[in-house]
Amino acid sequence: MRTLTRAGFLAGLLVVTSIGTTPARAAEAPTVFAAASLKNALDEIAGSYAREGKPAPKVSYAASNTLAKQIEQGAPADLFFSADLDWMDYLAKKDLIRPDTRVSLLANSIVLIAPKDSKAEVSMGPGLDLTAALGTGKLAMGNVEAVPAGKYGKAALEKLGGWAGVKDRIAQAESVRAALLLVSRGEAPLGIVYATDAAADANVKIVATFPADSHPAIVYPVAITQESRNPDAPALLTYLRGPAARAAFEKQGFTVLNRPATAAATP
């Protein structure tokens, strides 16, 4: 699987954002594999990084599980930015990231959303019951066994007692942004996404926020991959930890942790 060529694999990526690159710099630009929920913030950060005269990063967005598997198969990523600790740990156990570069950079929360004109009301807490608010529709979530937002959502529903009532009524999506889109288009009456995703889409509204203690802490780690040979990768990681990136992350609603991976996982 490691025999994939860099050009061949990049040609197969479905969603790649390249901001401000020029042919002369294309070979130097670092590639970031990032969780879909980071798109708004990282698009802004990539642009500001390029405006400072540095090689503009190329960012491939997808669910963290999809990206981790691609890196395992030899995808040419320089940095991996995951929406949970599990998928970063998955690569770490396979010696596919540089552990000394790993940082727990961000925190987030998960929310229950509905289309902006919805009249749905939900009492969030123990004994949670979504069946009335769902009506005949389904609950949009990332894949509950693999996509971080889906895993967090399932854990919260189980903790609050609401999983049994909806487990057969889940519209499982390939990423949290795909779940967001189902609600935004009115194809699902309710969805579970990150608070930052809800803030990025004017066609949805937050119905309720899941208590922080109802699910594992939502931590976004980032690290340079073991196979990266891009000389600009360390500088880009430093920039992601700096003040300009911090402002962009906070604007999108993230909490900036910026601590070594050896620190405790809770925000």
Image (tube, helix red, strand yellow):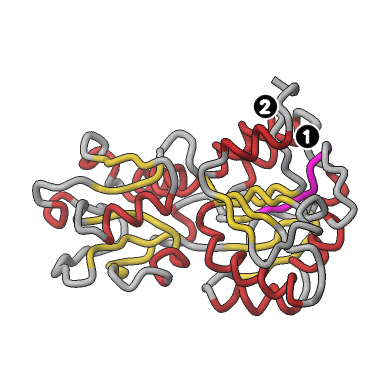
Q: Depth-wise, is mark 2 or mark 1 nearer the camera?
A: 2
- The one nearer the camera, 260 or 141, is 141
Left or right: 163, with 56 as reference point: left
Q: Position of residue 111 (x, y in %)?
A: 38, 62
Q: Residue flagged by tag 2: what amino acid is it? A: Gln
Please give the count of numbered marks on the rendered protein.
Answer: 2
Left or right: 253, with 240 as reference point: left
Q: Position of residue 256 (x, y in %)?
A: 66, 70
Answer whether residue 15 is magenta in the image. no
Q: Position of residue 167 (x, y in %)?
A: 26, 37
- Residue found 56% across the figure and 78% down from its top: 251
Residue 157 seen in render: yes
C-alpha gap between disc 2 and disc 1: 10 Å
Mark 2: which secondary structure? loop
- Residue range in magenta is 221-226
Kindly report the secondary structure that dominates the magenta region of the rendered protein.
strand
Q: Residues within 10 Å of mark 2 (few under 14, many from 20)?
A: few
The quarter of the image holding the C terminus is bottom right
Residue beneath disc 1: 96
Disc number at residue 10? none
- The one nearer the camera, 95 or 111, is 95
Left or right: 64, with 128 as reference point: right
Q: Residue flagged by tag 1: what amino acid is it? A: Leu
- Residue found 59% across the figure and 57% down from its top: 17
Residue beneath disc 2: 73
- Residue found 67% across the figure and 27% down from its top: 73
Most extreme residue toward the front is 23
- The one nearer the camera, 130 or 8, is 8
- Residue found 25% across the figure and 38% down from its top: 164
